[in-house]
Amino acid sequence: MSDPIRLATGNPGKAAEFARLLGAPVLPIDGWDPPDENGASFLDNARIKARAGARQCPGAWVVADDSGLCVDALGGAPGVLSARYGGPGLDDAGRVQALLTAVEGAPDRSARFACALVAITPDGTELATEGTLEGALAEAPRGANGFGYDPILIPAGETRTCAELAPHEKDAISHRGAAARRLREALGL
């Protein structure tokens, strides 16, 4: 694959993360026009974004992801609504606080990050992979690395949150890392 993979996002930071995870050049889609993510699962939403990206970049390799946090005490919420949890206008810190408030006093703090990736090849073939990272919720945010809910998920077997891990440590165990390794295998990268 000589041309860069186009990631269905306008976020250059996310494209840089996927370049690291896939071991290939990855660029965000110029002028990304995100579709409505109205799927029932992470895989549904990744597929919606991948197909929109393929329409915006015909003939290119396109990859899309959808990921989020699933909390057992909340029946799997926020799930596919992770980026919108707590209502409109909240930033990452606001969503984290809303989630910690919702689970306050819950005896079960088990949770997991889930990720689905969909790649569309230049000839229109679709490939899909998924990955998870099991863990538990911290009592309060810790760490400055990562984004989203990273400051409150402690991976199984760890005492640090994802936001306290170095990027290479997180990549080795993360939900995105697992899904990306499976996609690399499927793509022969």
Image (cartoon, rainbow, N blue to C red):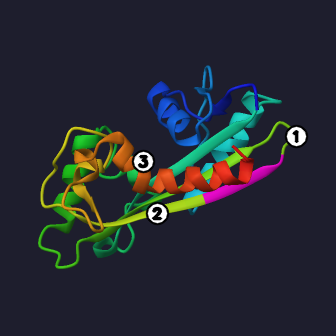
Q: Which residue is mark 3?
A: 171
Measure the alpha-carbon separation of dots 3 and 2: 12 Å
Residue 89 horizontal/vertical position (percent):
31, 37
Instruction: Residue at 22% x, 42% y: name it.
Output: 93
What is the CA distance from the residue labelled 1 to the residue labelled 3? 30 Å
- Asked whether 128 falls inside the magenta stretch, the response is yes
Q: Which residues are magenta?
A: 125-129
Query: Residue drawn at (27%, 68%), measured in percent from left and top?
Result: 157
Q: Is residue 39 visible?
A: no
- Identity of the amino acid at label 2? Thr
Which of 135 and 30 lies nearest the eye of the viewer? Answer: 135
The secondary structure that dominates the magenta segment is strand
In the depicted view, which residue is nearer to us: 136 or 73?
136
Q: Residue at x 41, y 56 (%)?
A: 173
In front of the other: label 1 or label 3? 3
Sequence-first tag of 1 and 3: 1
**SS for dot 2:** strand
The image quadrant of residue 29 is top right
Residue 137 seen from this side: yes
The circle drawn on residue 132 is 2
